[in-house]
Image (cartoon, rainbow, N blue to C red):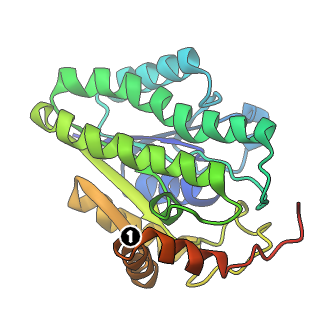
Amino acid sequence: MTRSAFITGGTSGIGLEFATRYVNAGWKVAVCSFESAAQVEGKIPAGVTYFSVDVTDAAKMADSIRTFAAQAGSLDLVIANAGINHPKAKIPDFVHGNKVINVNVNGVLNTFGPAIEIMVKQKSGQLVALSSIAGTIGGLPGMSIYCASKAAVLSLCDSLEVDLAQYGIKVTTLAPGFIDTPLTRGNDHPMPFRMTIDQAVTQMMKYIERGSGRFLFPLPMKIISTFLSLIPKSLAKTLLKSDAMKTGKH
C-alpha cells in the first residue's frame, strides 16, 4: 500500500524539499500553506495535492487533513514544518511575537490534533515537528519569543511521544541548528555550522526513519547546546551575553 504524508509550509524551503523527496519516492503527498492555489502553481511537484489553508485556522486545517487522509486511504506521516521567525532585538515586538507563537505553537497543535484522531483509529502513524536548537538554549539573546515557541514544541512532543506510543503512533522532534533558508537569510547575526537545505533534509529524513525521539543536529551545535545545559545557568548566561546582540536595535 502506498504511504501518505501531509506537510505544512510545503511550498518553499524545507517543506518543499520534503514534499519533493517523498513524492519522488512514490508516496501520496499533500502540502499546505497560506498562499492561494494560483500563487503556488508551478512551485510544487506534479502529483502533490495542495491545500490553501493557514496553519492558524484550526477548523480548515482539520478539514484539509481529514480530506487528504480519506483520499489517500490512510495518514502515515504528518510533518508540522510551518514556522516564522522575528528580528533579533532586546525589546521584543510583541505584536509580531504573538504571530510567531500562533504559527509556531498553535500551528503545530492545529496540525497534530486532527492527525492524532485519525492515527489513533488506524493504530499507526508518525508525527514530526520542526523545532530548533534555539528551543534548547535558555537565555539566547534577542530571540526570546522564537526560543519560547520552539521550546514549547519540544516539550509538547516529548510528552506526546510517551502518551501516544500505546496507540502505535511515533513522535519525532527535529531540532536543527542554522539552515540556509529564506527564513534565515535575513538574520543579521552569525550562523555557525549553517547547513544547506539539501544537507538538513537528508539528515532529517534519516531521523524520521529512525522513529520516535528528539534529534538535535548538526553535531557541533548539539555539543554546544548540551554543554550550555550542563554548566551553571549563570555561566551559560554570561557566555550567551558574549554574543553581544550583534544588532543595534533597541
> Which quadrant of the figure contains the C terminus?
bottom right
Q: Specify the amino acid type for callout 1.
A: Ser
Residue depicted at x 20% and y 20%: 121
Q: What x and y, as percent, mark residue 87? A: 78, 58
Q: How many marks?
A: 1
Residue 39 located left or right of residue 82: right
Tell me: residue 29, above or below residue 199. Answer: above
Using the image as rendered, state which of residue 56 and residue 125 is in the foreground: 56
Residue ranking furthest to the front: 234
Q: Secondary structure at mark 1?
A: helix
Instruction: Name which quarter of the figure residue 17 lies in.
Output: bottom right
Q: Residue at x 72, y 33 (%)?
A: 37
Q: Position of residue 185 (x, y in %)?
A: 75, 69
Q: Is residue 26 left or right of residue 62?
A: left
Taking depth in this image into account, of 220 and 117 the one nearest to the observer is 220
Give the x, y percent position of residue 72: 36, 29
Q: Nearer the viewer, residue 41 or 205?
A: 205
Task: Determine which residue is flagged by label 1.
Answer: 229
Query: Left or right: where does residue 29 sit relative to residue 35?
Result: left
Name the image quarter holding residue 171.
top left
Residue placed at 58% from the left, 77% from the top?
238
Say above or below: 192 vs 60.
below
